[in-house]
């Protein structure tokens, strides 16, 4: 992410991306491939469609807490999405500035889990006795960045992690990874001709030996056919748990989105095309399968 005029939100997003890209080798692998093939000149040429976060839907945390950071810095709350089987709720947020990534925040409906899983989760989240975002000076960039990178609760035990993993892989991911950036998204339609459709771009990724999430098909398509999405499979990271126990867990991943033009704008000259001419928002059925980029059935797929 690169912004000419550095506002506080730009610096916050850049910090998040720096931590994220250091944890996700596929980011540099894809960027280097794009540069080598002269599709872009550097990382800053990539338009970021959106970034996503996962949270626990409990008192003092969840969407109602986390969104305050972005609402304070010019983002506007948009549509709500529900994922019944995964027991998730989500909203997305847009910014009025050009080329600002959309924000997608999801939360786990903890009270819909089994009593055992709830007990484990509350053991950690109950350590947060008041909304931590309310304690921040949201105009203090360092303070916000530090908050986004620090633990919210004590280091979980491996037994607790594995127990949650059995019922909700989303829950186990959040209990360890906290507010780590879950993924960032390359706007494929903004790339040069020959690479600006998801079908063509995925072929390019295959040549880089990038493994893609095939849940619901490699390309997830909205009902109107105007939003296409694909994603890598989350890389595994060596995680240290309580009592120095270690275990390989799912980290973060990279997503790719193609937002097609609305039919009435399909004949617009390229130089006249603006974001408003393309499909906006998200699609629950697409997002439902994208979530599975961190799930075992994908990360351990042969």
Image: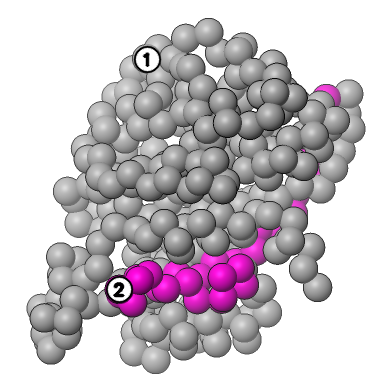
Q: Which of the two residues, 214 or 248, is positioned nearer the viewer here?
A: 214
Identify the residue at horizontal 49%, vertical 36% (top origin). 107
Residue 223 forms part of the magenta stretch: yes
In the displayed structure, does residue 25 sit left or right of residue 52? right
Identify the residue at horizontal 25%, vertical 29% (top origin). 72
Dot 2 or dot 1, earlier in sequence: 1
The magenta stretch is 214-242
In the displayed structure, does residue 2 sit left or right of residue 237? left
Percent coordinates x, y for residue 134 in the rendering: 37, 14
Q: Within 10 angstroms of label 2, few (less than 14), some, or many (20 or more) residues?
A: few
Identify the residue at horizontal 47%, vertical 71% (top origin). 220
Residue of label 2: 224
Question: Which labelled disc corresponds to residue 134?
Answer: 1
Viewer-nearest of discs 2 and 1: 2
Percent coordinates x, y for residue 179 in the rendering: 54, 35
Q: Within 10 angstroms of label 1, few (less than 14), some, or many (20 or more) residues?
A: few
Percent coordinates x, y for residue 223 in the rendering: 35, 71
Q: Which of the two residues, 66 or 193, is positioned nearer the viewer here?
A: 66
């Amino acid at each position: 992410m690169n912004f000419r005029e550095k506002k506080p939100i730009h610096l916050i997003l850049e910090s998040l991306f720096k931590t994220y890209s250091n944890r996700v080798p596929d980011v540099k692998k894809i960027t280097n491939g794009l540069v080598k093939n002269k599709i872009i000149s550097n990382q800053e040429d990539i338009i970021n469609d959106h970034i996503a976060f996962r949270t626990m839907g409990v008192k003092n945390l969840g969407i109602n807490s986390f969104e305050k950071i972005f609402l304070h810095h010019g983002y506007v709350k948009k549509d709500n999405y529900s994922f019944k089987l995964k027991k998730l709720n989500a909203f997305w947020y847009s910014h009025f500035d050009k080329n600002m990534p959309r924000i997608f925040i999801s939360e786990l409906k903890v009270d819909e889990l089994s009593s055992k899983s709830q007990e484990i989760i509350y053991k950690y989240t109950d350590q947060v006795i008041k909304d931590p975002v309310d304690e921040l000076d949201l105009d203090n960039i360092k303070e916000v960045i530090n908050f986004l990178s620090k633990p919210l609760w004590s280091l979980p035990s491996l037994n607790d992690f594995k127990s949650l993993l059995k019922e909700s892989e989303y829950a186990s991911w959040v209990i360890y990874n906290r507010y780590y950036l879950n993924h960032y998204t390359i706007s494929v339609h903004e790339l040069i001709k020959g690479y600006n459709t998801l079908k063509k771009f995925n072929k390019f990724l295959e040549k880089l030996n990038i493994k893609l999430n095939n849940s619901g098909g490699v390309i997830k398509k909205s009902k109107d056919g105007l939003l296409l999405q694909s994603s890598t499979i989350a890389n595994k990271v060596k995680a240290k748990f309580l009592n120095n126990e270690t275990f390989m867990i799912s980290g973060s991943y990279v997503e790719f989105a193609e937002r097609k033009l609305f039919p009435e704008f399909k004949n617009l000259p390229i130089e006249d095309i603006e974001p408003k001419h393309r499909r906006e928002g998200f699609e629950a059925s697409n997002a439902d399968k994208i979530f599975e980029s961190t799930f075992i059935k994908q990360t351990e797929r042969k």
